[in-house]
Image: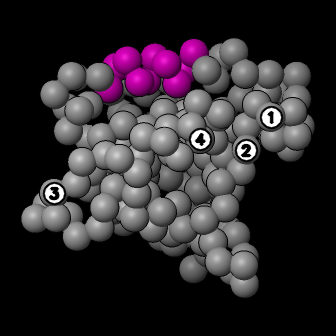
Amino acid sequence: MATLTELCDSGALDTIDPLEPDELPWRTLYGTMEFLTWLDQVLPNLEHNPMYAKLTPLEQVSALFAEYVSGDDFFSDRRFKKLSWTPDRYVWELKTDDVRIFGWAPKKDAFICCFGDAKDRIVIENSYGRYIAQTVYVRDHIELNEPKCLTGGSYKDVISNKN
């Protein structure tokens, strides 16, 4: 078993740092290698309807990541949401207008991104259940020290607010 730092050192995970060099992080984002490949190769090519959202999917995710890492208030909206129909799975999603990102909180103020996809594709294919199951599978099989995830169901269990 390993710590988050050791998993990053081994190449199983990597940190996602969306902040400017002079900004300090409040929270930490990690990505699996599969997620980071999706982030680099698929996300920039997702379809975008400018009438639906002003920002492209890539811009939406970049802004969301920066807001999460910088410690913005996520208690008052639905950008960060526990998937309530799977309360015992402890899978959370980060949401933008066009994109859904699935993962889990290994400790307070940390989130591991496992899978991302276009919101419309998830709705059309009814693939929430598949992404939840895949996220749980990754979490169960990653060599992370126990406990691998926080089992609280409220925002205050998994993220703090710097304000």
**Is 60 contained in the magenta span?**
no
Q: Residue at x 41, y 46 (%)?
A: 43
What label does residue 14 carry, if any? Answer: 2
Q: Label 4 crowding class (10 Å Cα cut-off): few <14, some 14-19, many 20+?
A: many
First in residue order: circle 4 vs circle 3 = 4
Amino acid, disc 3:
Asn
Badge 1: how crowded within 10 Å, few (<14), some, or many (20+)?
Answer: few
Helix, strand or loop at disc 4? helix
Magenta stretch in the rendered image: 128-137
Determine which residue is flagged by label 4.
Answer: 36
Residue type pointed to by label 2: Asp
Residue 7 is situated, as x and y percent measured from the top left of the image, at 82, 34
Mark closest to the chain's N terminus, 2 or 3: 2
Disc 3 residue crowd, few under 14, some 14–19, many 20+, Cα 10 Å: few
Specify the label residue 49 is tagged with: 3
Q: Residue furthest bottom?
A: 22
User: Badge 1 is on which residue?
Assistant: 11
Q: Residue at x 71, y 29 (%)?
A: 148
